[in-house]
Amino acid sequence: MEKQSEESDIVIAPMTIRHLPDVFELGHKAFDTEVKPYTSWSLSAAAVHIDAAHPACFVALRGSELCGFVLGSMTFEQRADWGYLEWIAVDSAVRGRGVAGRLVAVCRDHLMAQGADAVITDVEARNEASLALMRRHGFTVGATVNLLAYARETAVERPPSLGAGRNSDAPHSEQ
């Protein structure tokens, strides 16, 4: 199921277990839990999709080097007939080359082929680039969710604002 556009040296391929260390490393770069402690990137977060009955996990490869990934599956907890595109990340060295769009399209199309009536994803409201990416690929806003935090008055550190720090615009979607 390898796909490669004529203008690109980047191949989109199904993820295999051999890609997992590189996916995990790129995920740690993209989803910085020090900046956003509520971001749940972890091996178990990735494994939910990788080990699902109907995974939709793909990687972007430049030669043998992983430069992006998307993790999705038919595991949306609210509806068994909806697919969930939860994690996408692209290495900064290849951003602007359409890699994120290709990953979104292959994951979305794969989930629809697996029988999804809809594919769900979530993007932080301030992440205009990811919102535009998803809209270009047919996604529309279905609901708005707010993250609320409560901290002790004596806390040395307050919860980080949504706009602070590295990768602050991408809790689950990094392009």
Image (spheres, grey):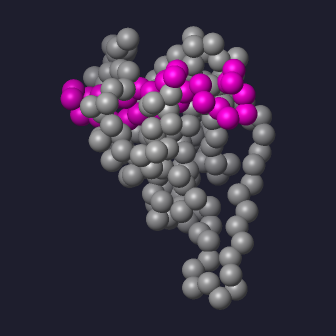
Is residue 106 or residue 98 the one in the foreground? 106
Farthest right residue?
Answer: 143
Residue 127 placement (x, y as % from top left): 60, 48
Bounds of the magenta segment? 53-82
Q: Tell me: residue 171, above or below residue 3.
A: below
Residue 32 placement (x, y as % from top left): 45, 57
**Residue 60 falls inside the magenta stretch:** yes
- Residue visible at 70% across and 17% down in the picture: 117
Residue 174 in sight: no
Is residue 40 or residue 68 the one in the foreground? 40
Residue 111 placement (x, y as % from top left): 57, 19
Q: Tell me: residue 38, above or below residue 82.
A: below
Task: Place residue 162 in its image quadrant.
Answer: bottom right
Farthest bottom residue?
Answer: 154
Is residue 148 or residue 135 the one in the foreground? 148
- Residue visible at 50% across and 36% down in the picture: 48
Residue 166 placement (x, y as % from top left): 46, 60
- Residue visible at 63% across and 43% down in the picture: 123
- Numbered marks: total: 0
Q: Quadrant of the image for the N terminus?
A: top left
**Residue 27 falls inside the magenta stretch:** no
- Residue visible at 31% across and 30% down in the picture: 17
Residue 39 in sight: yes
Q: Tell me: residue 21, above or below residue 34.
A: above
Q: Position of 165 compared to 66: left or right?
A: right
